[in-house]
Amino acid sequence: MTDAAELRTRAEELLAAHPPATTDRTTFLKARFGAGLAWVHYPKGLGGLDAPRSLQAVVDSVLNAADAPDNDPRRIGIGLGMAAPTILAYGSEEVKERFLRPLWVGDEVWCQLFSEPGAGSDLAALGTRAVRDGDDWVVSGQKVWTSSAHVARWAILIARTDPDLPKHRGITYFICDMTDPGVEVRPLRQITGEAEFNEVFLSDVRIPDAHRLGEVGEGWKVAQTTLMNERVSIGGSRIPREGGMIGPVAQTWRERPELRTHDLHQRLLTLWVEAEVARLAGERLRQQLVAGQPGPEGSGMKLAFARLNQEISGLEVELRGEEGLLYDDWTMRRPELVDFTGRDAGYRYLRSKGNSIEGGTSEVLLNIVAERVLGLPSEPRNDKDIAWKDLAR
């Protein structure tokens, strides 16, 4: 089995053959992928070495110390955190070989076509249709809240392939080409002034059956892999102490003693401790991932992420007083990456309002934690065995 010493040697050999100071970024990243040092727990030939997931930190430490370029994970987070693990679990060998390298290198950006105007929190009620036509599927419908759709080359998509079955059983999972002429992307301007999200209209988009992930009608099962990984990537990302939202507030507290009050001090202490608890819980969650796939615990982490971001950013605005009411720029932008903590206090306060919606609403995640973590009884539902076409809408 590959061990830490071997990985350290491989990383040093990569640096010697492709010195970061004289090798362009893309060439270096492709060489890293080819050496199996992209994600070491992936199979050989697909950017990994079948090594324990925990040993990725060994590679990263060697390359970071040499100031080697990374793949800009914030820009390609949907591909890395959602599309890649789903492709690895359900894609054919041809699909894995076609998509994983350009995804990891960052040559191709991905987006997620899941939510719909009439099926947001109740995702399984989606109505986008996919109809078989020879070796292709023809897809029509509308998706919404799609981050990075305006820059994406590919999308992970779920669509209804059998309206005669109950809603969870008539869904199939696809890879969608965002350059297809039937794909139309429109910006959704947010409270921050930006249009990081989009709505996507699909009109007779043709998807080859070879780009289907999982069996026909098993899209909900495949989507659970995506969703669990999504919640881990949002709520359980690795950050240093005082990383994320709590960092700017703590810095302002230290640098601006004139803003301090006893009440604000008590609230800051409470939130600092909660942020640190969440950070350490994220570390434990990542350790659990070493032994298997992400479970419903990621939903709890994502819940904590949303609540803390909103409470901490609210405290920051209050701490800054009149300054906290200022906003630097309402210019309409279409950013290439998701930035939860960028810009000023006003931006952080407004952007955090979306944290309890994106990646699974807090209300839905509370149900998941209650049922799948705490083992509480499921809420009574009368739509599980009714054909989707017969559901009231």
Image: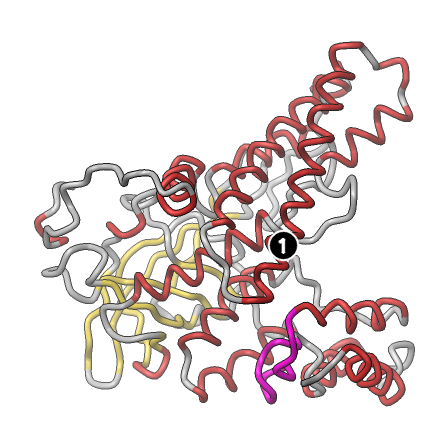
| Between 103 and 182, the one nearer to me in the picture | 103
Q: Which residue is mark 1?
A: 337
Left or right position of 367 against 102: left
Name above or below for residue 115 compared with residue 111. above
Q: State the residue at coordinates (59%, 53%).
A: 285
Question: x, y percentage for residue 261?
Answer: 80, 10
Q: Which residues are magenta?
A: 40-53
Question: x, y percentage for residue 382?
Answer: 14, 41
Q: Secondary structure at mark 1?
A: loop
Q: State the residue at coordinates (31%, 54%).
A: 142
**Is any part of residue 322 visible from this angle?**
no
Q: State the residue at coordinates (34%, 67%).
A: 182
The colour scheme applied to this rendered structure is secondary structure
Question: x, y percentage for residue 309?
Answer: 62, 34
Q: State the residue at coordinates (72%, 38%).
A: 276
Left or right position of 29 against 190: right
Prevailing SS of the magenta stretch: loop
Q: Residue furthest top?
A: 262
Give the quarter of the figure containing the N terminus. bottom right
| Between 151 and 339, the one nearer to me in the picture | 339
Query: Is residue 43 part of the magenta span, yes or no?
Result: yes
| Between 127 and 385, the one nearer to me in the picture | 385
Left or right position of 21 against 133: right
Name above or below for residue 34 compared with residue 365. below
| Between 54 and 77, the one nearer to me in the picture | 54
Name above or below for residue 320 compared with residue 383. above
Residue type indicated by callout 1: Leu
